[in-house]
Image (cartoon, rainbow, N blue to C red):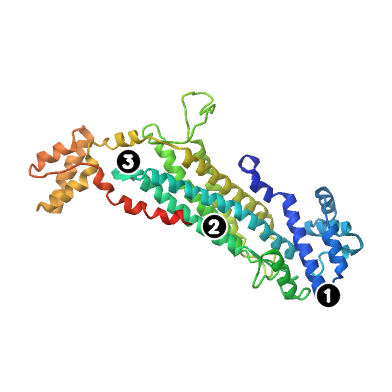
Amino acid sequence: MIERYTRAELGAVWSQRRKLDTWLEVELAATEAWAQEGRVPADAARAARELATFNLEAVAERERITDHDVAAFVDVVAASVGEHGRWIHYGLTSSDVLDTALALQLRDVGEIVLAGARGFRDALVERALEHRETICVGRTHGVHAEPTSFGLRLAGFAFEADRNLVRLERAFESLRVGAISGAVGTYASVPPRIEQRVMLRLGLRVEEASTQVIPRDRHAELVGAVALAGAGLERFATEIRNLQRTEIREVEEPFGRGQKGSSAMPHKRNPIATERITGLARVLRGYAQTGYENVALWHERDISHSGAERIVLPDATIALDYMQHLATKVVRGMTVHVDRMRSNLGLTHGAIYSQRALTALVDSGMSRDEAYRVVQAAAQEAWDEGTPFAELIAEAAPELELDLDPAPYLRYVPELIARLERLRET
């Protein structure tokens, strides 16, 4: 992912240095496991632990000769150890190192991404509780429907964020597996007990059947969960973008001191953070497709997944981390124009209370179809002509007493908002 969207903490986890550090962790754990087995001299394992090192430039230079990244790395590390360097990578194949090390990186990635997902959810919960009684108009098809609570609207996003958090937790947990099973996963060159010792030391589980690689459905589940979390962020971002439109102006993104909305028009305060989220969500869906394409490999293994994965896994998680960070800032800092919400309730001159009038007429004995037509005519005239809906209904049904107050629409909102307390406990 380009530097513009890479936050430092996660960028460090996906750095070339960190990747090769995890390779070294796996190699040393394997050497020590072999020493426990008695196949590698104990002195060699100690020497490897004390002396093994590498230089990024040296590895890159060696790869230009070998045209094989793991072989180049092994050559450089083995040389750093000296005479005992011959035991580095003993009995292993490249994917034993690559996939197990990738699991270590993804474990660290998960800690950062999950913390961001949790922070976004928690920010939504807090603002939802703050605005539980803030009345605004609900919209369906982009058209005024009935009154609702802005807090309830945010609660919907909070519960979605929680579901995305759970999906991400499950996907990252599924990837806490490694494999040290040899060339085609038969353990012909390295017995299962070596694998078990290595995974115990690294804090990973053993892949049940690795062929030569960890099955890529695990990685596809992650990029799928990332894309779905991105879609949830996009749904929230789209709502804020719509509510910030000049004609609505019920909510605005934070706008910092010294910030400029337009190079040409000084009055502009554009929803640029939520627009960025929307755009990057599209990228994540493309990465998910690539993740699914990577599942089907030839026989025990090919490398058709490798090049794509080197892009998709870092970029998808880096982008999601950035999007979550932006969205959390928007939630915490957004300006909610409560008065504007109240004002917008009256744009249809009371027509949004049409269902209440319909129900009242049916209760009074009128057939539903007749009541619907009476109310529809009054509502459309109120909307088109600006005549108060209550006056038109009073003319059409003088005997009807109709209270057009938005408060009753929110009578069950406290019960719904109370469900947020469950999220505060997780």
Return the x and y of residue 21 as percentages of the image width and height: 75, 55
Does dot 1 land on a helix, a strand or a loop? loop
- Cα distance, mark 2 to mark 3? 32 Å
Q: Which residue is mark 3?
A: 136
Q: Residues within 10 Å of mark 2 (few under 14, many from 20)?
A: many
Tell me: residue 252, above or below residue 422: above
Callout 2, which amino acid?
Leu
Callout 3, which amino acid?
Cys
- The residue drawn where x is 47% and y is 52% is 161
Callout 1, which amino acid?
Gly
- Cα distance, mark 3 to mark 1? 73 Å
Q: Earlier in the sequence, mark 3 or mark 1?
A: 1
Q: Earlier in the sequence, mark 1 or mark 2?
A: 1
Identify the disc placed on residue 416: none
Which dot, 1 or 2, sits closer to the camera? 1
- Cα distance, mark 1 to mark 2? 41 Å
- The residue drawn where x is 14% and y is 36% is 391
Q: Residues within 10 Å of mark 3 (few under 14, many from 20)?
A: many
Which quarter of the rendering shows the N terminus?
top right
Q: Which residue is mark 1?
A: 38
